[in-house]
């Protein structure tokens, strides 16, 4: 009867040894001595390696000389207490098999620090490094924590379309979806749309919000968690063409409820990472950002600042700082402004709310002053905006007027408008950038390094 594989995590985390287990993984290092060799094996289940001792009596011991960093092996042996420092157990091999060799002359990952820029060129191999293996395990834990939070708080998980005919943000920065041949794509615009798969123009969604709203207006509280796409010609460390968004929508809710939910969700996610991912988090606290533990502890412990947009502008105008982008009433806040507020002025997260109506999307609820809308952005140190949301305009006449004002096609939103015609209620929601939260909890400064295969401006490798 074959012996099933035991993960390195299980081997190192158990309370006792085992007479015989099989471990499979990749060789990180090999060290030879007279009569035996030491292998450090990692299988991705945790940050730690398992030390394997292979002496001359083990079946396949002669293969050890062919093992370099990156080779994959299957080792059968006895799990025993380790006499050395650093780990409780080691594996005394009785047999060893090479599953896949790795030529040490050409394998690009060796036992040294590699730059992030270099690792982006080998994104298919970088998950085998300590840093990116830890990041991906944290990403997995964070995603599970999202679902757990909303389940506990009574939200239904819904799935909104990835292909859409509506521009949620009204900015036009959308990827077109087409089934036309190159020749058909050269037709005039109207003929091209008519001939295409849907008989109209189709795009990759920038947000699931518009279709999540009708679901919230039936189920009360919903959220969607999936990929979104922006054809924005931006090559910054915070922007990607394909990224994941967490988007809750709540019926019978206002801006205050929205801010409460955003703060509660973010604190819960950070708390979960600190509690459940101590080993992987420790790597980032040691090698990426030594100030991370203290900053995240304060993030969880202190209330977020809640700041009207007008007051934010006054603070920025009085700051003794030369900003690259202008500051003033009616102008949107740029990343440098957001980071000044969070990193220098308040030194903690800030929720800016009640933005000028002129710089926000059509669906945001107009305030009584007719100048601002009930919108909010959550800004955090080191990153800037991680959440953007609003109370939604539930009044049909004001929503229709705003769509016309922005010269958007009213007929394209007929179904959205009907939710205001039949039993409308106050409601609110937001979008949380999943990768930006991952940047927050790891201290990683570039969005390209918190996703397995980044899709960014002029980059579609892998």
Image (cartoon, grey):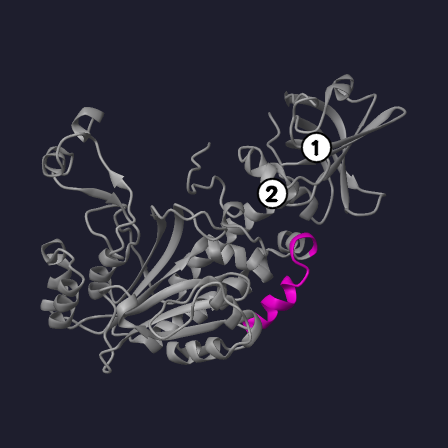
Could you tell me which secondary element the residue under label 2 belongs to? Answer: helix
Q: Quadrant of residue 39?
A: top right
Of residues 196 and 86, the one nearer the viewer is 196
Judge the density around disc 2: few (<14), some (14-19), many (≥20) Cα neighbours within 10 Å: some
Judge the density around disc 1: few (<14), some (14-19), many (≥20) Cα neighbours within 10 Å: some
Q: Is residue 409 above or below residue 31?
A: below
Q: Which residues are magenta?
A: 286-300
Q: In this rendering, does residue 372 appear at all?
A: yes
Determine which residue is flagged by label 1.
Answer: 110
x and y, in percent, of residue 79 in the image: 74, 38
| 257 is within the stretch colored magenta | no
x and y, in percent, of residue 126 in the image: 58, 37
x and y, in percent, of residue 82 in the image: 81, 42
| 297 is within the stretch colored magenta | yes
Of residues 23 and 147, the one nearer the viewer is 147
Q: Residue at x 51, y 55 (%)?
A: 438
Of residues 452 and 272, the one nearer the viewer is 452
In the picture, the disc for residue 116 is 2
Q: Quadrant of residue 108?
A: top right
- The reply to whether the C-beta atoms of the residues labelled 2 and 1 are less than 8 Å apart is no
Of mark 2 and mark 1, the one earlier in the sequence is 1
For the stretch drawn in magenta, the main secondary structure is: helix
User: Where's the N terminus, which quadrant?
Assistant: top right
Q: Marks 2 and 1: which is nearer the front?
A: 2
Could you tell me which secondary element the residue under label 1 belongs to? Answer: loop
Q: Residue at x 50, y 67 (%)?
A: 323
Q: Taking 351 as reference, is 44 left or right?
A: right
Q: Taking 361 as reference, is 461 left or right?
A: right
């Amino acid at each position: 009867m074959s012996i099933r594989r035991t993960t390195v995590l299980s081997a190192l985390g158990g309370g006792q040894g085992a007479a015989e287990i099989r471990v499979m993984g990749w060789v990180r290092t090999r060290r030879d001595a007279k009569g035996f060799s030491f292998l450090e094996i990692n299988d991705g289940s945790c940050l730690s390696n398992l030390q394997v001792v292979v002496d001359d009596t083990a079946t396949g011991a002669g293969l050890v000389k062919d093992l370099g960093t990156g080779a994959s092996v299957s080792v059968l042996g006895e799990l025993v207490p380790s006499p050395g420092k650093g780990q409780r157990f080691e594996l005394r091999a009785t047999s060893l098999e090479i599953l896949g060799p790795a030529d040490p002359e050409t394998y690009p990952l060796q036992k040294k620090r590699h730059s992030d820029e270099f690792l982006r060129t080998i994104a298919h191999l970088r998950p085998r490094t300590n840093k990116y293996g830890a990041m991906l395990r944290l990403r997995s834990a964070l995603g599970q924590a999202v679902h757990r939070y909303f389940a506990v708080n009574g939200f239904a998980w819904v799935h909104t379309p990835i292909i859409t005919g509506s521009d949620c943000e009204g900015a036009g920065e959308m990827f077109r979806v087409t089934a036309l041949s190159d020749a058909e794509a050269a037709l005039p615009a109207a003929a091209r749309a008519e001939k295409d798969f849907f008989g109209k123009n189709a795009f990759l969604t920038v947000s699931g919000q518009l279709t999540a709203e009708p679901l919230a207006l039936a189920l009360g509280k919903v959220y969607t968690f999936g990929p979104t796409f922006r054809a924005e010609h931006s090559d910054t460390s915070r922007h990607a063409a394909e990224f994941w968004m967490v988007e809750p929508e709540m019926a019978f809710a206002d801006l205050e409820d929205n801010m409460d939910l955003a703060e509660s969700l973010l604190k819960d996610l950070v708390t979960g990472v600190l509690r459940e991912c101590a080993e992987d988090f420790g790597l980032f606290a040691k090698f990426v950002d030594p100030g991370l533990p203290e900053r995240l502890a304060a993030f969880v412990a202190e209330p977020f600042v809640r700041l009207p947009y007008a007051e934010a502008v006054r603070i920025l105008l009085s700051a003794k700082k030369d900003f690259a982008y202008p500051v003033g009433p009616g102008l949107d806040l740029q990343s440098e402004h957001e980071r000044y507020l969070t990193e220098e002025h308040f030194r903690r997260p800030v929720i800016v709310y009640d933005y000028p109506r002129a710089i926000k999307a059509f669906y945001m609820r107009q305030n009584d002053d007719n100048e601002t809308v009930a919108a909010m952005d959550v800004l955090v140190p080191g990153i800037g905006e991680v959440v953007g949301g609003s109370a939604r305009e539930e009044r049909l006449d004001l929503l229709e007027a705003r769509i016309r004002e922005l010269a958007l096609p009213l007929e394209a939103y007929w179904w959205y408008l009907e939710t205001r015609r039949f039993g409308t209620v106050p409601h609110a929601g937001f979008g949380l950038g999943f990768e930006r939260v991952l940047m927050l909890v790891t201290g990683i400064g570039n969005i390209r390094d918190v996703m397995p295969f980044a899709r960014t401006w002029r980059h579609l490798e892998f």
